[in-house]
Image (tube, rainbow, N blue to C red):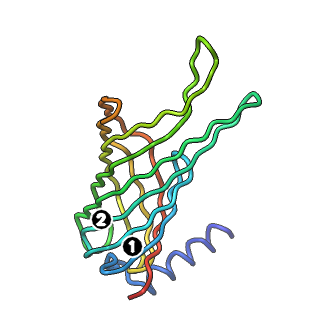
């Protein structure tokens, strides 16, 4: 019964909004990202293909009586390859991260910062010009301070975007 109800609601939303609703354009939006910690983002859709904005992410880990928190800020540029339907995209982000590192010899902890350029890719689907769902993975991280290069297909994120009507 639950599967039928879910399928009925999904079909209703697809029919009401059009199976190939257009991406947002000229709108501000907010979003939530689930994956490597909970994050929020502010986005401006310049046109259906180009989105700019900033992401804030905060994560905390607690184990054996101690906790560690990570803070990330990242302005981004996103290019969507399609203006309607399922749209593959590439995302470039300047990431500033602050997190604790424990010295294994002394056991003391200090906060360190890291800056990097992160390139990711994903797929977006906008149900209508106001609401969309995205899935993305990190592909390449170029560490600026400290210098490093990371190729990966993680972390993965699931994102929900809500754009305000014009």
Q: Secondary structure at mark 2?
A: strand
Q: In the rendered image, which quarter is residue 20 located in?
A: bottom left
- At horizontal 30% and vertical 29% (from top left) the residue drawn is 147
Location of residue 118 in the rendering, given as x and y in whole percent from the top left corner: 32, 44
Q: Which residue lies most toward the top here?
A: 105
- Tag on residue 87? 2
Q: In the rendered image, which quarter is residue 51 located in?
A: bottom left
Location of residue 122 in the rendering, given as x and y in whole percent from the top left corner: 34, 54
Q: Are marks 2 and 1 in contact (CB under 8 Å)?
A: yes
Q: Secondary structure at mark 1?
A: strand
- At horizontal 35% and vertical 30% (from top left) the residue drawn is 146
- Tag on residue 126? 1
- Tag on residue 136? none
Q: How many marks?
A: 2
Q: In whole angstroms, how far apart are the C-alphas of marks 2 and 1?
A: 9 Å
Q: In the rendered image, which quarter is residue 8 located in?
A: bottom right
Give left or right: position of 9 versus 96: right
Residue count near mark 2 (Cα–Cα under 10 Å), binned few <14, some 14–19, many ≥20: some
- At horizontal 55% and vertical 27% (from top left) the residue drawn is 101
Q: Earlier in the sequence, mark 2 or mark 1?
A: 2
Location of residue 151 in the rendering, given as x and y in whole percent from the top left corner: 31, 33
Q: Quadrant of the C terminus?
A: bottom left
Nearest to the observer: residue 101 or residue 86: 101
Q: Quadrant of the N terminus?
A: bottom right
Against 100, residue 10 (above or below) is below
Against 40, residue 9 (above or below) is below
Against 145, residue 27 (above or below) is below
Nearest to the observer: residue 58 or residue 12: 58
Location of residue 116 in the rendering, given as x and y in whole percent from the top left corner: 33, 41
Give left or right: position of 162 versus 5: left
């Amino acid at each position: 019964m639950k599967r039928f109800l879910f399928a009925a609601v999904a079909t209703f939303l697809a029919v009401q909004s059009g199976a190939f609703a257009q991406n947002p354009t000229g709108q501000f939006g907010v979003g939530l990202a689930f994956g490597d910690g909970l994050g929020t983002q502010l986005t401006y859709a310049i046109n259906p293909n180009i989105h700019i904005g900033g992401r804030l992410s905060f994560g905390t880990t607690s184990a054996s009586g101690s906790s560690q928190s990570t803070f990330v800020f990242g302005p981004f540029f996103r290019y969507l390859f399609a203006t309607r339907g399922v749209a593959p995209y590439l995302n470039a982000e300047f990431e500033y991260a602050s997190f604790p590192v424990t010295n294994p010899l002394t056991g003391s902890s200090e906060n360190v910062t890291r800056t990097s350029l992160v390139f990711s890719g994903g797929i977006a689907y906008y149900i209508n010009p106001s609401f969309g769902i995205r899935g993305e993975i990190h592909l390449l991280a170029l560490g600026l301070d400290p210098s490093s290069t990371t190729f990966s297909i993680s972390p993965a994120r699931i994102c929900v975007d809500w754009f305000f009507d014009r």
